[in-house]
Image (cartoon, rainbow, N blue to C red):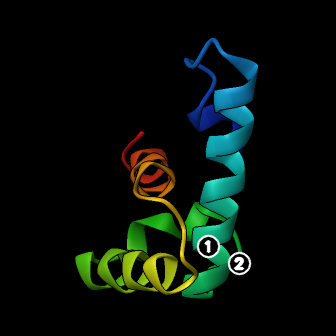
Amino acid sequence: AAAEWFANIDNPRTRRAYLNDLQDFCSFVGLAGAEEFRAVTRSHVLAWRAELELRGLAGATIRRKLAALAS
């Protein structure tokens, strides 16, 4: 199901990274799967971004992870 979201992305590494990012986000928010993604609010995304910053991830990595959510 979630892999279908990124089917339009040609680069397999990008597609795999986006899928991992989506799974990471779903785990953080407590979603059982991408099917529940419609319940996500802006507050969830902001909280995840803050968590990513606390993990010490690079800005480019955080932007990629957020881009995965927007895809």
Percent position of residue 53, x then y: 44, 78
Residue 15 vs 45, above or below: the answer is above
Q: Which residue is mark 1?
A: 26
Percent position of residue 61, x then y: 51, 53
Residue at 64% of width from left, 29% of height from top?
A: 14
Residue 32 vs 66, above or below: the answer is below
Q: Amino acid at mark 1?
A: Cys
Between the C-alphas of marks 1 and 2, the distance is 7 Å
Residue at 61% of width from left, 73% of height from top?
A: 26
**56 lies left or right of 12:** left
Do the residues bearing badges 1 and 2 touch, measured as CB atoms within 8 Å?
A: yes
Percent position of residue 43, x then y: 27, 85
Residue 10 vs 32, above or below: the answer is above
Residue at the outermost top position: 10
Q: Nearer the viewer, residue 24 or 51?
A: 51
Dot 2 crowding, Cα within 10 Å, few <14, some 14–19, many 20+:
few
Q: Which residue is mark 2?
A: 32
